[in-house]
Image (spheres, grey):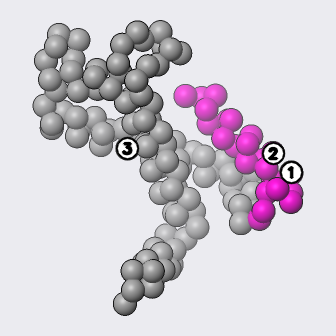
Amino acid sequence: MSSKTDAEAKLQQFLSKHGREGFLKLLLTNYLFELAMYYLHSEKNPAAQIREDTSYRFYVDGQERVYLPEEIERFKNDLRVECKKKAAVIVENLRKMEILDKLGEDITQNPAVAELVQKAFESITQRT
């Protein structure tokens, strides 16, 4: 079986088990996690008034002690759990706004759907 065929089969299997909602939750969880990790590893973070390399601070505490790999992994696991919670809230907002089923539409053709998606994302960012 080719890798493309295998990937398609695994995707169909996942969708059969978890549905589109499950896929969207997983996608958003991973997106939020990667976004947070990128933010933490970015060279500078002027919005937080940090004047040093934040990626360095991800691995070294304020007393110049290196965090243990287990501590870093625990942090990443905790972060992923929080991202999963946020993803679930976003998907729930999309469902409440009755646009979850409309996500397959081309939003460039339907500005109302684009606006609803934007409102769903804005509602979650205002609570964090």
Q: Specify the farthest residue to the bottom.
A: 1
Q: Earlier in the sequence, mark 2 or mark 3?
A: 3
Based on the picture, tell me whether residue 57 belongs to the magenta stretch.
no
Classify 55 as above or below 94: above
Cβ–Cβ under 8 Å for marks 3 and 1: no
Whole-percent x, y for residue 125 in the image: 61, 32
> Which amino acid type corresponds to the residue marked 1 in the rendered image?
Ala
Quarter where residue 66 is shown: top left
Mark 1 = which residue? Answer: 112
Classify 3 as above or below 111: below
SS for dot 1: helix
SS for dot 2: helix
Whole-percent x, y for residue 118 in the image: 73, 42
> Which amino acid type corresponds to the residue marked 2 in the rendered image?
Glu
> Which amino acid type corresponds to the residue marked 3 in the rendered image?
Arg
Mark 3 = which residue? Answer: 80
The reply to whether residue 109 is visible in this rendering is yes
Whole-percent x, y for residue 122 in the image: 68, 35
The quadrant of the image that shows the N terminus is bottom left
Highlighted magenta segment, given as a residue range: 105-128
Gap between marks 2 and 3, in whole Å?
28 Å
Quarter where residue 3 is shown: bottom left
Name which residue lies at 17% across and 10% down. Answer: 63
Gap between marks 2 and 1, in whole Å?
5 Å
